[in-house]
Amino acid sequence: MVYVKEKVPVKEGLFKWQDEEAKLIVAKCTKCGEMVFPQQSFCPECCLETMEPVTINSIGKLKCFTRITAPPPGYKGSVPYTAGIVEFPEGIRILGITTEKEVVNLEPGMEMEVIVDTAFIEDEKEYVMFKYKPVSQGED
Amino acid sequence: MVYVKEKVPVKEGLFKWQDEEAKLIVAKCTKCGEMVFPQQSFCPECCLETMEPVTINSIGKLKCFTRITAPPPGYKGSVPYTAGIVEFPEGIRILGITTEKEVVNLEPGMEMEVIVDTAFIEDEKEYVMFKYKPVSQGED
Amino acid sequence: MEEVVIAGVGMHEFGRFDDKDYRDLGFVAAKRALEDANMSLNEVQAAFSANVYEISAAGHNVLEKLGVPGIPIINVENACASGASAVRLAYQAIKNKEYDVALVVGFEKSPRGFLPGAGYDRWQEWTGLGANPLYFASSIHEHMVEYGTTREQLAYIASKSHKNAVHNPYAMFRKELSIDEVLNARMVSDPLTLYMLCAPNDGAAAVVICNKKVAKSFTEKPISIAASVLETRRRGDMFVPAVSAPANPPYPTVAERAAQSAYEMASLGPEDIDVAEIQDVDAGSEIIYSERLGFCPIGEGGARAEAGETSIGGRIPLNVNGGILSRGEPVGASSLGQIAEITWQLRGEAGVNQVEGAKVALSHSEGAGGNSCVTILTR
Amino acid sequence: MEEVVIAGVGMHEFGRFDDKDYRDLGFVAAKRALEDANMSLNEVQAAFSANVYEISAAGHNVLEKLGVPGIPIINVENACASGASAVRLAYQAIKNKEYDVALVVGFEKSPRGFLPGAGYDRWQEWTGLGANPLYFASSIHEHMVEYGTTREQLAYIASKSHKNAVHNPYAMFRKELSIDEVLNARMVSDPLTLYMLCAPNDGAAAVVICNKKVAKSFTEKPISIAASVLETRRRGDMFVPAVSAPANPPYPTVAERAAQSAYEMASLGPEDIDVAEIQDVDAGSEIIYSERLGFCPIGEGGARAEAGETSIGGRIPLNVNGGILSRGEPVGASSLGQIAEITWQLRGEAGVNQVEGAKVALSHSEGAGGNSCVTILTR
Ligand SMILES: [Zn+2]
Ligand SMILES: [Zn+2]
């Protein structure tokens, strides 16, 4: 068992997670409505500093996915793992890791829930990351 | 004492050294006379494949020099060391390491002789390199 | 506005050459291109290099071996589209009479394994999102879901590539592979097996670009540059290393935009293209791009390929010398390799894989950063 | 042929910023330059980035933070002259009506210690010849031997730089240094002490380049680009990483050639320059280049500096905001920093270090590969 002093996100501002429901934070343009994840201050379309952070629905539809068997550069987790693109009702598609190791557990079009889970542990810190979890499988 | 199986040059084609007087090999253009070190097949001036290898006089004049105290990237020798530009009678200036650790042993304009000496030892191989040695100091 | 032609092309073989450094590779390609153009570096007024993984002054160091005439040299890095981006700079400069002759040389010693440095942020790398094949696999998987593209069609593309490459002396892989062999190979990023993904490798390619009038004194086989386009992704393209995209962007993809600009510039359409080298960085990309470049309707790329339309002798032969899947991808050199190959096609010098009577050819490269280049050549 | 102006400039401070990556630095500089030009990225039609040490699509990744308008982006690497080389591409493209507005952004997170990747062959590195300061030190030592330039004159240059930098918010070193402090500092590469050599560091700078007619709708203080030149060394310049040179080359150095081309292009001479930022990568370089750029006779650079001619208020003030010696050198950003500084000078916005009435200014950058850029601006 690894001793963990604190939990920290892999990057600040990606998701809400502490003492509240896990939700992705996107930036939304107050002028044109464009959304971008991770959040940034300039709108990709308007090219103006018109974005504000908003959270989106924690459930979306899985559009496509893949399974990776060899660790890519800098990866601190275990292989194999799966990743996919989820389309959220607000109209944004976001690439993320899923909770599943095998694609057999995934179906195009299935509902996925955003959860926050351990990414890796390093220097007594538990780094947490958003992941997509199939809604059908083991809901609360 | 490090065991050395063989002596090899730091790069082939830089200098003559085995069983003969140490001499730098330059490429000389058969068309315009331009010389370049290390040798290459194209003339820097004519841009044609008109170069042939020739050796040059093993003694030249020291134009300028410096002393380096911290090891640069990839350096396999010891610090401090000195390096300088020697101008050879054929009309080419070549940058090289000297045998001296201190600039106090060097004078602008002094005659320097090309010798071949140990650069470093690695994997039981002694890598040899040309160096400039003051002619006044300990000639044979 | 001057007319611009390709006066010479040259390649160093693509593969793994552990005893050569990037200078050796670039030197050979540039030397061959200059020889092909009956020129020396003395005739060249500006040079552009294309490379990703070297640090500094790489083009300068390559060209030193061919002469030191003091011309301006610019090193360009635009990922997989580096070479074609550099061609565009040379093309524009010659079109605008800045120079009469420019040399573009691309070269690469690719690192082994997954390519680093595509621009991922640290958190993407840490969590496993920093993997290029993940992007390629996701794209083609969505295509499969939406249009019924099959694994067999992906395998067909890879098998076609390897069959084409048998006769290409510049390709890394020159052995035929059956559809079964492709399907049964190690799964790298589902649905892409090892043979459906290109291998980054070493290599070099060079192109001499020239004012058409000036070219006459050097070569009797100039090939015209009818279009040279570089576009960059908008938000709809969730390209390496982007993490999100709008669900239904109301504008075309970057490949569509680059193709459209190129067709307009050349006053030609996709129906006029006789042969094309397109960014088959994986088998899925060949399918997707064959649609986006206008060679068949959206969704039909897999079926059309399987029906032989993109094979030699088919309606629109794609990657007839094996493409990136068989040549491998020395990133900086890759798109110049494409341009060399289609130049040979238009000259009728492509040997066994010659597309008979090819008059118009297209090269398409696309990669990290969302760069998309389309170059159209005519004879 | 269109007239070309600088419509806006911006810098991120030069220094060490361990908590920021290159994207953060480039973003700030680009944002400030666009704000200065009263533009957003939507007005920009093409972008050029200047960077040495990032791997791929670096400019794309920086600009993403300001918008994703799909414009062509080209990443340029030309060592210390990367920024000015990119400016030249933008300048040529706008002059030739390819675009009306282009953004050039340079950024760097320099590695610590001796800079790697200057293009040395392995044997040079192994044997100790792969060290940039060795080249700088040799050059100025020969100058000392030939013309009697003194260590005190070198120290004077460094001291002048540090004095000038006190009021420059973008400089890394803003503390005055006496001539004795410079002379007594650690000897790095004889005769160059620590304070006579620039420190590679982090930073960013950006320039908005614009068609003069179009600029009128955005800014009331356009600065004209009278010349933008890139030349590359001939054999006589034994520049990093060259090992040999002819003893008596019958042609000018690359700095002389670049300056000559620039003066011709601008129809101006060195006597017309009111203020200049030149490549003081070390104190010796400032002396040598002050001569090669025509600001004083060959051999007199050290004495003229010591006599105050190159100080603020002198005949030809050089590096009046501290130059590279005090700003430090974020390699890709460095020459854009020069251009930003002289733009402020010509606008009369340079504060304490303003050269009164400056109408014509020059920027000179030179580095690995033998790149030499000279840019002349006028108001
Ligand atoms: Zn907006
Ligand atoms: Zn010659």
Image (cartoon, coloured by chain):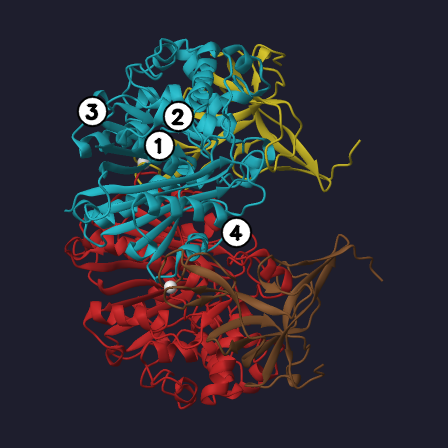
Chain colours: A yellow, B brown, C cyan, D red
Classify the position of ligand 2 by quadrant: top left, top right, bottom left or bottom right: bottom left
Of tags 1 and 4, which is closer to the observer?
1
Q: Chain of mark 3?
A: C
Amino acid identity at mark 2: Asn
Spatial distance from mark 1 to mark 4, Cα to Cα?
A: 43 Å
Report which residue position mark 2 lands on.
C321
- Helix or strand or loop: what does disc 1 sit on? helix
A46 lies left or right of A26: left
Report which residue position mark 1 lands on.
C341
Report which residue position mark 3 lands on.
C269
Identify the mark nearer the N-term, 1 or 3: 3
Spatial distance from mark 1 to mark 3, Cα to Cα?
A: 21 Å
Indicate the quadrant where residue D33 lies. Answer: bottom left
Q: Are marks 2 and 4 in contact (CB under 8 Å)?
A: no
Query: Residue C50: image x %, image y %?
Result: 40, 45
C203, above or below A99, in the image: below
Amino acid identity at mark 1: Glu
Q: Are marks 2 and 1 in contact (CB under 8 Å)?
A: yes
Report which residue position mark 4 lands on.
D20
Identify the mark nearer the N-term, 2 or 1: 2
Q: Residues within 10 Å of mark 3 (few under 14, many from 20)?
A: some
The disc at residue D265 is none
Q: Is the same chain shared between marks 1 and 3?
A: yes
C154 or D352, nearer to the observer:
C154
